[in-house]
Image (cartoon, rainbow, N blue to C red):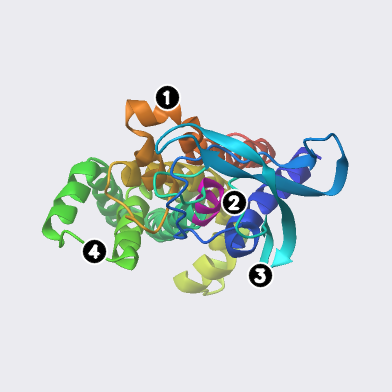
C-alpha cells in the first residue's frame, strides 16, 4: 500500500509538470504589468450579498496607489472558466487568477512553478540516466575483468571523485559567452551534474558483479565456452538492475536539488525560461522575502517531489535487503 501511494503521488506530480501547458492558467512568460507582486487571488463561491454561486468566481483587483496594497473590487466579478484556450481553467477577461500570486513582472507564479518544474525535473532525470550509465559501464568492467583493469578503473574513479566540480563548473562557465541559450545551459548542467555522481553507483555495481561472476550458473556458462560479452549481457547485467533502480530513486532528487542550487546561483538556465532555482533567486532580497512570501513557492514545490522519491528509495532499499 505504501509503495502504491508513493507511486500515485509521484505520477500525479509528474503529470502536473509534464502537462504544465494544460494545468497552468497562463504561459510562463505572460506578463500583467499592472499587477506586480499581486497576492494570491481568492476564489469565491459567495458574493458580497451572501448569495451562493455554483460557479466559482474572482473579484477584480485594484491598488490604492502605485506600489500600494492590493484590494478586491467587489463591483467587478469574473467567473472562473474551465477548458478554455487549451487550458484547464482561467479567469474570464479582463479578470486575473493568480493562485500563488505574481512576481515583479506580473507573471503568474503558479504557472511558472509548473513550467519551471519541467527544467528542474528533466535535469534530474537526464543527469541520473547519464550518471547511472557511466556507473554501470565502469562498475561492470571493473568487477567482471578484475586484476589490473579493476585497479585502473577504481583508482581513476577515486581521482574523479576528488575533483572540485563546483570550481570546474565555474571555470567552464567563465569560458562560455556571457549569454548562452537555454539549450546550452541545460546540457551544461546535465553534463556537470551527471558526471559528478557516477562513482558511488559504479562501486556498488562492481560489488554485485564481483559476486555474480563466481556464481554457479555463470561458471557453468563460462565452462561451455560463453564469451565475456555474452556472460555480461545474459547473466551479469540482470543482477544489477535492482541496484540501478534503487540508485536512480536516490540520485534523481539529489540532482533536482543540484539544479535548483546552481540555477539559484546563476549558473543554470536563465530568464525568461523558469526553473525552480532561478525563480527562488528572485526571493533573495530581504524585502521581497518578507513582503511577498509567495515567491518561496518554487522551494515549497520541491518538497513533495523530493519526499516522494526518497520514500520510494526507502521502500526499494527495504525490499532489496542490506548492502544497497
Crowd rating for badge 2 (residues with CA inside 10 Å; few <14, some 14–19, many 20+): many
Q: CA distance from mark 4 to mark 3?
A: 31 Å
Crowd rating for badge 1 (residues with CA inside 10 Å; few <14, some 14–19, many 20+): few
7 to the left or right of 102:
right
User: Residue 87: percent from the left, percent from the top?
Assistant: 66, 64
| Tag 2 secondary structure | loop
* Image mark for residue 96: 2
Question: Which residue is denoted by mark 3 in the rendering?
Answer: 86
Q: Residue at x 43, y 36 (%)?
A: 65
Q: Residue at x 39, y 44 (%)?
A: 104
Residue nearest the observer in this picture, 86 or 281: 86
User: Residue 166: percent from the left, percent from the top?
Assistant: 23, 43
Residue nearest the observer in this picture, 66 or 198: 66
| Contact? badges 2 and 1 (CB < 8 Å) | no
Question: Which residue is denoted by mark 4 in the rendering?
Answer: 180
- Which span is picked out in magenta? 109-115
The mark nearer the N terminus, 4 or 2, is 2
Question: Which residue is denoted by mark 1 in the rendering?
Answer: 290
Amino acid at each position: 500500500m505504501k509503495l502504491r501511494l508513493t507511486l500515485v503521488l509521484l505520477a500525479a506530480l509528474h503529470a502536473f509538470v509534464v502537462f504544465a501547458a494544460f494545468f497552468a492558467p497562463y504561459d510562463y512568460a505572460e506578463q500583467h504589468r499592472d499587477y506586480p507582486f499581486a497576492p494570491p487571488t481568492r476564489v469565491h463561491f459567495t458574493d458580497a450579498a451572501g448569495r451562493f454561486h455554483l460557479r466559482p468566481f474572482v473579484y477584480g483587483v485594484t491598488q490604492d496607489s502605485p506600489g500600494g496594497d492590493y484590494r478586491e473590487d467587489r463591483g467587478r466579478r469574473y467567473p472562473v472558466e474551465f477548458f478554455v484556450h487549451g487550458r484547464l481553467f482561467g479567469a474570464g477577461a479582463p479578470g486575473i487568477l493568480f493562485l500563488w500570486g505574481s512576481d515583479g513582472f506580473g507573471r503568474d507564479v503558479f504557472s511558472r512553478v509548473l513550467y519551471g518544474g519541467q527544467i528542474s525535473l528533466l535535469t534530474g532525470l537526464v543527469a541520473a540516466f547519464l550518471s547511472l550509465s557511466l556507473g554501470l559501464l565502469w562498475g561492470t568492467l571493473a568487477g567482471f575483468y578484475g586484476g589490473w583493469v579493476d585497479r585502473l578503473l577504481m583508482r581513476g574513479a577515486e581521482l574523479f571523485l576528488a575533483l572540485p566540480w563546483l570550481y570546474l563548473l565555474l571555470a567552464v562557465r567563465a569560458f562560455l559567452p556571457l549569454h548562452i541559450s537555454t539549450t546550452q545551459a541545460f546540457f551544461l548542467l546535465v553534463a556537470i551534474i551527471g558526471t559528478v555522481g557516477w562513482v558511488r553507483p559504479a562501486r556498488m555495481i562492481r560489488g554485485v558483479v564481483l559476486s555474480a561472476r563466481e556464481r554457479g550458473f555463470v561458471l557453468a556458462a563460462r565452462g561451455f565456452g560463453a564469451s565475456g560479452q555474452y556472460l555480461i549481457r545474459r547473466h551479469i547485467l540482470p543482477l544489477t538492475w535492482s541496484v540501478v533502480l534503487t540508485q536512480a530513486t536516490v540520485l534523481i532528487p539529489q540532482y533536482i536539488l543540484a539544479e535548483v542550487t546552481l540555477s539559484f546561483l546563476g549558473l543554470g538556465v536563465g530568464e525568461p525560461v523558469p526553473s525552480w532555482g532561478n525563480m527562488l533567486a528572485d526571493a533573495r532580497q530581504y524585502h521581497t522575502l518578507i513582503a511577498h512570501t509567495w515567491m518561496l513557492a518554487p522551494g515549497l514545490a520541491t518538497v513533495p517531489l523530493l519526499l516522494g522519491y526518497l520514500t520510494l528509495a526507502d521502500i526499494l532499499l527495504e525490499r532489496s535487503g542490506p548492502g544497497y
